[in-house]
């Protein structure tokens, strides 16, 4: 029992150390999806499923120019929206989701995006991850930790979780980190995954978090690598 408690304390401390390290390295990290308001962020986040943020940012200017509000998007034609977002993949389902979402916003909330988790996840095409993005980024409400592919991979590699599903990983991280860190931790970890801890070739010797990373699943660093880190 004593060893278990000690391991738990060490895990919490490592999580906090990593959070502090990420803040030092990526203090100004923000959501990579370009948006001007909660509605645009909600649409962009739905479109980002199984797609890069860069590709989404390439099509949303045209989409938002034609459909800048829930009222406009709710009255759009399915075929027209599909044409605009065609390059994103799963364009039919995504077009249907953002149009359905806009129609529900208009019907239930006069076109405004609700700042409430339960109300958001009840809208078409919106799961907990999307709701967390919108609440945290647009409203500053820490409803949870956004777990995308980067966060899933890095938190397992760092030894912060052994869970395999986004839902369980999120719960693990929420227990390890204070609520005020939930939003920024995810933003910063995503930047870290793109810049240093890249999937195919993590740059461990350049990583400012190396002392608190267990490098789960990676081969040991060589002596020369450790000395240069």
Image (cartoon, grey):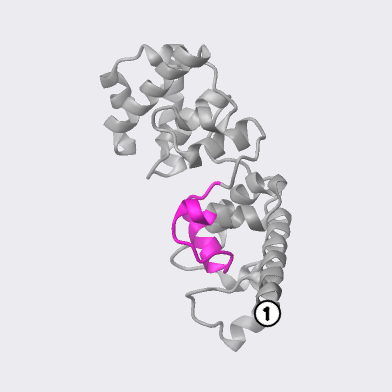
Q: Alpha-carbon neighbours of circle 1 within 10 Å: few (<14), some, or many (≥20)?
A: few
Residue 55 in the image, given as x and y percentages of width and height: 41, 39
SS at mark 1? Answer: helix
What is the quadrant of residue 192 in the picture? Answer: bottom right
Q: Is residue 195 left or right of residue 166?
A: right
Q: Residue furthest bottom?
A: 223
What is the count of numbered marks?
Answer: 1
> In front: 194, or 182?
182
Question: Which quadrant of the rendered structure holds the C terminus?
Answer: bottom right
**In the rendered image of this protein, does residue 161 appear above or below residue 71?**
below
Q: Is residue 167 visible?
A: yes
The residue tagged 1 is: 3
User: Residue at the spot x=59%, y=49% of the render?
Assistant: 186
| Residue 155 forms part of the magenta stretch | yes
Question: Which quadrant of the rendered structure holds the N terminus?
Answer: bottom right
Residue 128 in the image, given as x and y percentages of width and height: 49, 40
> In front: 43, or 107?
107
| Start-end of magenta stretch | 146-169
Residue 69 in the image, given as x and y percentages of width and height: 48, 15
């Amino acid at each position: 029992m004593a060893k278990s408690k000690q391991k738990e304390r060490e895990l919490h401390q490592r999580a906090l150390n990593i959070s502090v390290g990420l803040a030092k390295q990526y203090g100004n990290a923000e959501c990579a999806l370009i948006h001007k308001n909660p509605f645009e962020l909600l649409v962009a986040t739905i479109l980002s499923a199984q797609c890069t943020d860069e590709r989404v940012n390439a099509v949303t200017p045209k989409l938002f120019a034609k459909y800048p509000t829930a009222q406009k998007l709710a009255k759009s034609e399915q075929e027209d929206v599909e044409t605009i977002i065609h390059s994103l993949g799963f364009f039919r389902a995504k077009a249907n989701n953002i149009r359905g979402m806009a129609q529900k916003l208009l019907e239930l909330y006069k076109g405004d995006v609700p700042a409430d988790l339960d109300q958001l996840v009840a809208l078409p095409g919106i799961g907990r991850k999307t709701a967390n993005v919108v609440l945290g980024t647009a409203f500053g409400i820490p409803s949870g930790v956004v777990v995308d592919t980067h966060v899933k991979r890095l938190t397992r590699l760092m030894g912060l979780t052994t869970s395999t599903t986004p839902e369980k990983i999120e719960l693990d991280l929420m227990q390890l980190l204070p609520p005020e860190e939930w939003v920024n931790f995810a933003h910063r970890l995503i930047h870290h995954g793109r810049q240093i801890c890249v999937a195919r070739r993590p740059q461990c010797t350049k990583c400012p978090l190396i002392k608190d990373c267990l490098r789960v699943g990676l081969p040991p660093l060589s002596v020369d690598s450790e000395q240069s880190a």
